[in-house]
Structure formats: structure tokens, C-alpha cells
Amino acid sequence: MSGTSSHVRCRQGPGAPRKPSWRRSLPYLPVTLILAAVSLMMLAPLAWLVMSAMKTNSEIFNSPWSPPAELRFGNFAKAWTVARLGTYVFNSVWITSVSVVAILALSSMAAFAFARLRFRGRNVLFAVFLIGLIIPIQGVLVPLFLLLKKAGLLYTYPGLILSYVAWGLPLAIYVMRAFFLSLPRDLEDAARIDGCGLFGIYWRILLPIAKPAIATIAVFSALGVWNELLLVQLFINEDTMQTLPRGLLAFSEKYRVDYGLTFSAITMIAVPMIALYAVFQRWFIDGLTAGAVKG
């Protein structure tokens, strides 16, 4: 009996034969297939966009789902020239960069106060910020227009950037606060023992750890500002100060739209945001799940 049990233990130990890798992955096959199908569904519109960018109007209308008869890479160069995208790209990069940096700086400091400090009216003030998540930007256009006009910021970049910052702060504060709440208090206690003040704890301890939340906020904010058209149309009246979405209107005439050039321009506009997400993908996912248990 002892020999038999010893034999059984040996078979179950490290030397026991293992299942082939394909057998171990069989239970996950249905989930893998579902995720692959969803991925294809997500990639299909992007592939169709790139394919349509190299077609003529007649090809788009007559055979919208078939590949182009020839690869017209010249559509991209023509779209860049016709819509003067160079000027709009510079404006969009500048406005987006300043807006995102301001949103990150202000939201991280506000979230640190809401998550780590005790002061009267903290929950009420946080609730006021959260109201911004449920109010659509269209509902405040008139008072925002009048406010910027009285402040002398109408038709200027500072007025537009301040509007974007105010629009992006509620979500940014919510995400950053949830991340700060998920961090242990021991970090602060250790920092205080080492002589750190409040700003030192925020700047040297918590902020470097908050890279996932920062990446999430940066991606969301950059997407919102980069693709925004309504505010820039209302608050900027000079064509040379407009942003990239405004450039798409160059392909629309009264009775005709050049869809081939439009799709080419949309493709060039989408590439920077896709690249941004690809760079910050790992941190972006971590930031979305931060504070899921505690927050």
C-alpha cells in the first residue's frame, strides 16, 4: 500500500505528465472567440474608413464595401492642402496640450484634497463638481457665452481653453479621487515621518503612483478636446484660429460633398488619438479599474 500511495504521489508531483497547452486553453476558447469577434467588429469601421479614404465619390456610392480600384494615396496630400490642415493641426495640438495639462494639474490637486483632507463642506463641494457629469455642454452655452463676453475672453484661445478645462474637470476629479482613495494611508504616514508636508505627500508620493489615473484622464481629455467642434465654432470667429474638426467643413459645398477627401482627412485626424491610446493602453486600463473596490 505504501508503495502504491508513493507512486500516486509521484504521479501528482512536479514530474507528473502535463496536459498539452491546447488542452489547457480549451475552456477559454468560447471567450477567446467572442473577444475576437468583438475586436473585428471594432476594427471594421476603421478599416472601412481607411479603405474609403482612397476611393472616389462614385466608388463610395456604387461599391461602398469593396476595396478601391486603385490605392489613391494622393487623396491624403490633396485633403491636407485643400483643407489647410497644417494650420488646424498646429492649433489643435496647442489647444489640446494646454487644456490637458491644466485638467491634469487642477484635477489631481482637487482630488487629493477630496480624498485625503478633512474639511467642512468637502462632500457638498465634491457633489457640486459631480453635477458637471450630468449637465450637457449644450445646456450652458448661453450663460457661458455671456460670461466669456463679460470677461473679455470671447473669441480668444484663453476663453476656449478655460471652457474645455471646466468641461473636463468633473470626470477627471472623479477618476483621480477614486485612485487616491484606493491607496493605503501608510504611504502618507511614512512620508510624514520623513518630514513631508501636504504638498510633498501629493507631489513626491501620491502623484508618481497615480500614473494609471493620469493616463486615463489624459486620453479622455485629449479625445474630447481634439474632436470638439461646437465650442470652437461659437467662441472662435477667425478661420486661422480654428481646430481640426473645422477643417472637415472645407470639403462640403452647398450641393456636394467630396467624401473621398473627407474620409482622408478624418483618417489623418484619427491617427494621433489612436497612437495616444496605444501608448497609454496599459495605464489607461489600470486607471479605469482603480477604485473599483474602494472609492
Image (cartoon, grey):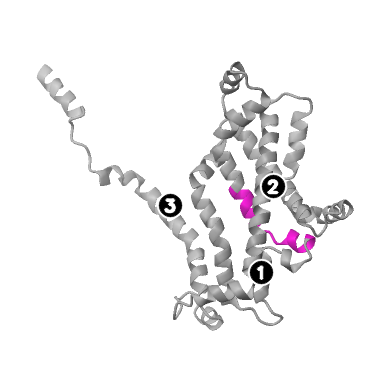
Q: CA distance from mark 2 to mark 1?
A: 23 Å
- Judge left or right: residue 54 versus residue 86: left
| Residue range of the region highlighted in magenta in the rendering | 219-235
Name the element at disc 3: helix
The residue drawn where x is 48% and y is 64% is 44
Q: Are marks 2 and 1 in contact (CB under 8 Å)?
A: no
Q: Is residue 178 above or below residue 33?
A: above
Question: Magenta includes 17?
Answer: no
Q: Quadrant of the N terminus?
A: top left
In front: label 2 or label 3: 2
Q: CA distance from mark 3 to mark 1?
A: 36 Å
Name the element at disc 2: helix
Q: Which mark is residue 35?
A: 3
Question: Magenta includes 222?
Answer: yes
Name the element at disc 1: helix
Mark 2 crowdedness (10 Å alpha carbons): few <14, some 14-19, many ≥20: many
Mark 3 crowdedness (10 Å alpha carbons): few <14, some 14-19, many ≥20: few
In front: label 2 or label 1: 1
The residue drawn where x is 53% and y is 56% is 274
Mark 1 crowdedness (10 Å alpha carbons): few <14, some 14-19, many ≥20: many
The residue drawn where x is 51% and y is 65% is 45
Q: Which residue is tagged 2?
A: 168
